Image (tube, helix red, strand yellow):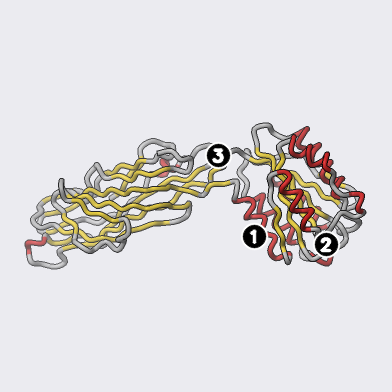
Amino acid sequence: MSLERTGVEPQSRIRAIGAVIVIVILLFMGTSQTLNDAAADTAQIGGGYISPRVSSGDDSIWRASSGNQPDNTSVTLTVAGSGTKGITLAPQDVVFIMDHSGSLQTYDPQVLRILAAHEYIDNMIAPFDRAAIVKFDNTATLFHHLSSAYAQVHADLDALAKSQPQGQTNFQSAIDLVNTEFETFGSAENQRIALFFTDGVPDPPSANVTISQMDELVANGVKLYTIGLGPELDENALRWMADYTGGQFYKAETAQELVSIYMKISDQFYNYTAGMNLTISAYLNPELEYVPGSSNVTEGFMVNTSDGTLLTWSVSHVRIGQNWSVHFRVRSPDGDGRTRVLKDESEISYVDWRGRN
């Protein structure tokens, strides 16, 4: 028995086709099917969808009036969150601004800041999201311009990890370079994000950012996310830099927290929803009846027998990679021949990740 989506792109309504049921003295031939792979096609920038399947616990059962056992069987309906994450709002241009001053040998000797940036890039969607690496110490250096050639971006991070941290902490030089990169190579269609990592304060103090630099970031549409590590930070300054541009400040007490911080920022720009506000409507064929009290999911469950038997479950949310399932039992009082478990009217309706019904 399978529920099948119509169309190729993710749809928010899924109709049923029938599985085989045998009702001679025996009832129900169990099957388990999933959606055709072609139905798993997603929009260009990703997105989740609902992929359901139905299976039975027994190959066959006796009609209830025969007096033989088994005279009922379990049915399992599974709703899987399928697809890939979708981009919220717009793809992103991200510049990773990496402090490379000498103190990092003390506060991040395992270069976990580099691992965190690798993880962030691995979560990006090519060719839409783009990235670039800027490192700063006495001055700032751009490795390559914004690009979705992630192999090159990863190579730039590896090169940075292999080089010795040294020198001072020139905030001003780093922000100047980032502004130039976005002005020259930033995409007008992408969100503009800068992740500013440091373990210290501007050194020398004259290398601090200026109001005019921050205004330029705002004018360029750049949100600055500041990430501070260790005990030598000026947290107020980093928080001010983030707030000024509509970004956010994150504090890592230890380098071990950096990966989770970077991924927390990354996940803000993606949607992992497969479906919301699901209504699962299972219309039993007339030869079958629901065994009262057999649904293992009771929240949001209703039985309507005004016109045949309609079983409905309401589910608030299914994420990509998550399975929701329900088990219930059916029997046939006087059935005979072959039929389907569910009628063609059976369906799953939901709101997809874009908010479409």
> In the visual, does 119 lie left or right of 295?
right
Q: Residue at x 76, y 39 (%)?
A: 217
Residue occupied by mark 3: 45
Q: Is residue 148 visible?
A: no
Numbered marks: total: 3
Task: Pick whichever of labels 1 and 2 is earlier in the sequence.
Answer: 2
Q: Residue at x 56, y 42 (%)?
A: 88
Task: Pick whichever of labels 2 and 3 is earlier in the sequence.
Answer: 3
Find residue 242 and report its horizontal and vertical position in percent.
Answer: 73, 49
| Amino acid bearing label 3 | Ile
Residue occupied by mark 2: 104
The C terminus lies in quadrant: top left
| Amino acid bearing label 1 | Ser
Q: Residue at x 27, y 44 (%)?
A: 17
**Residue 67 position (above or below residue 201):** below
> In the visual, does 347 lie left or right of 261?
left
Residue occupied by mark 1: 260
| Amino acid bearing label 2 | Leu
Frontmost residue, 193 versus 118:
193
> In the visual, does 246 lie left or right of 303?
right
Categorize mark 3 by other alpha carbons within 10 Å: few (<14), some (14-19), many (20+).
Answer: some
**Residue 64 position (above or below residue 98):** below
Categorize mark 2 by other alpha carbons within 10 Å: few (<14), some (14-19), many (20+).
Answer: many
Task: Pick whichever of labels 1 and 3 is earlier in the sequence.
Answer: 3
Disc 2 is placed on an element classified as: helix
Disc 3 is placed on an element classified as: loop
Find residue 187 and report its horizontal and vertical position in percent.
Answer: 69, 33
Mark 1 and mark 3 residues within 8 Å of each other at the beta carbon: no
Q: Quadrant of residue 297?
A: bottom left
Give the distance between the C-alpha atoms of the residues marked 2 and 3, in whole angstroms: 37 Å
